[in-house]
Amino acid sequence: MHPAHDLLAALGVPAAALRGGTLPVRSPIDGSLLAQLPESDDAAAAIGRAQQAFLDWRSVPAPRRGELVRLFGDELRAHKAELAALVTLEAGKIGSESLGEVQEMIDIGDFAVGLSRQLHGLTIASERPGHRMMEQWHPLGVVGVISAFNFPVAVWAWNAALALVAGDSVVWKPSEKTPLAALATQALFARACARFGADAPPGLLQLLIGGAGLGAALADDPRVALLSATGSTRMGRAVAPRVAARFGRCLLELGGNNAVVVGASADLDLAVRGIVFGAWGTAGQRCTSTRRVLAHAAVHDELLARLERARASLPIGDPRESGTLVGPLIDGRAFDAMQAALAAARAQGGQVRGGERAPVGGWGDAWYAAPALAVMPAQSAIVCEETFAPILYLLRWEHFDDALRLHNAVPQGLSSAIFTNDLREAEAFMAAEGSDCGIANVNIGTSGAEIGGAFGGEKETGGGRESGSDAWKHYMRRATNTVNYSRALPLAQGVRFDF
Ligand code: UN1
């Protein structure tokens, strides 16, 4: 039996569910076939089951709904190692990053449990005597979640934990590259539901296994009140207009092209640590990965030397081995895209170090690449594109205004960071005229955000905000209530209508 099947059995997914279907699932570690999954053929029926579940779930008190998320968190804690090992097998992340991903699920669960007692609206002063205005937040409906291979379970959890305490049901379409982690998560959730008892209606979480057609079905179905989609800008462009056409709500978390600005006063030890993890950790396959470094001329050469030393020494290999820091790309297409980007960088005047295929384990159908560093003469076309691979572009600036201009001159707007000990630079970077991204950090890198803040970005990143802060409001509908406790009926704005 494949080790994946042992893991899945421990997580509650029987081996029989992994065979005989049409969707091959391969491990990027060695290209081996992990499963041959049956694909979902009736998205409408799944959405119908979720809709039915919503009708019951919305009237369960929110703190009780939180109790279900708490139980799910217990399952995650108890099975953290197995679920993380599965993420490593299926997505190719190194062990500590996979554990971090499951930890992120646990953390958002805790956040949501607390939130389940804090889904509060406002009381607002009315202009009319004897009147009170308030707002309430009600459950929204079925929430569709489209998730990407690179965070196969955490990003779903950001959405699902909030949706569940908000009183919504969830239909989840995971990436067809990582459906096993989704199956395992669904099995853990089913265990939590069984412990929770009859208040959890069947159908609360539906899984759609398969390709883009299922995502399109979620986009088009008017019963899906909110579609939260994480992935490429191309995917967002396909999904968002379809949801808009039926006046549904979208929450988009699309591509990033995240930069680190390094000022002349920066602590280079910190900057190098933040950039190396951000650029080459997760083999460059986070939407928050650092793609660009914009270095002040005074530190450019030293930074380049230190980055190059680190780059050349990063251990590339099987992500199951403890010393490995850079695992495989998800597949051969990702490797080809990386090569195409490096060729473009060279053609545009870049000096490229690294990027070649790394032979690991003698596996022909696994795609490991040496991290790449490209010193660019200008922010040319390829630098403005997101390539989901470990490529870091380095650019130079002399005046802070130029750094900001370069920083914001890309179509994406997810994450950003500045390393500086100059208070003026730090504050200017976070100010209105500074970074135009949804996330702007000082003296930490672009990737690895905590769940407590709102996560997402502007421009082609899609504008959505998930996870912490008040992102929960996306998953609820707001009702404004005006109550008249007087014995008269005055009209607002002083309008007279006497008859
Ligand atoms: C993603 O890559 O889609 O901030 C999400 C981070 C992680 C989430 C990334 N917490 O890097």
Image: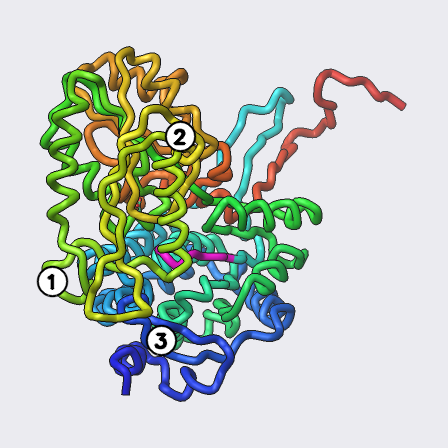
Crowding around mark 2 (Cα neighbors within 10 Å: few <14, some 14 to 19, many 20+) is many
Q: Position of residue 486 (x, y in %)?
A: 66, 29
Callout in the foreground (2, 1):
1
User: Residue 328's x, y, as percent?
Assistant: 27, 60
- Tell me the residue at 61%/37% (across/down): 481
Tag 3 secondary structure: helix
Residue nearer the viewer, 7 or 143: 7
x 42%, y 60%: residue: 65
Q: Which residue is mark 2?
A: 437
Q: Can you say whether 203 is above or below 116 in the image?
A: below
Residue that numbered label 3 is attached to: 191
Picture disc at residue 322: 1
Q: Which residues are magenta?
A: 145-150
Identify the image quadrant of residue 391: top left
The residues tagged by marks 3 and 1 sit, at their Cα atoms, a distance apart of 31 Å
Q: Amino acid at mark 3?
A: Arg
**Does the beta carbon of the residue at mark 1 sit less than 8 Å from ligand 1?**
no
Mark 3 burial class by Cα count in 10 Å: few <14, some 14-19, many 20+: some
Could you tell me which secondary element the residue under label 1 belongs to? loop
State the SS at label 2: loop
What amino acid is labelled 1 in the image? Ser
Specify the quadrant that holds the N terminus.
bottom left
Instruction: Please state which amino acid type lies under the numbered disc 2.
Output: Cys
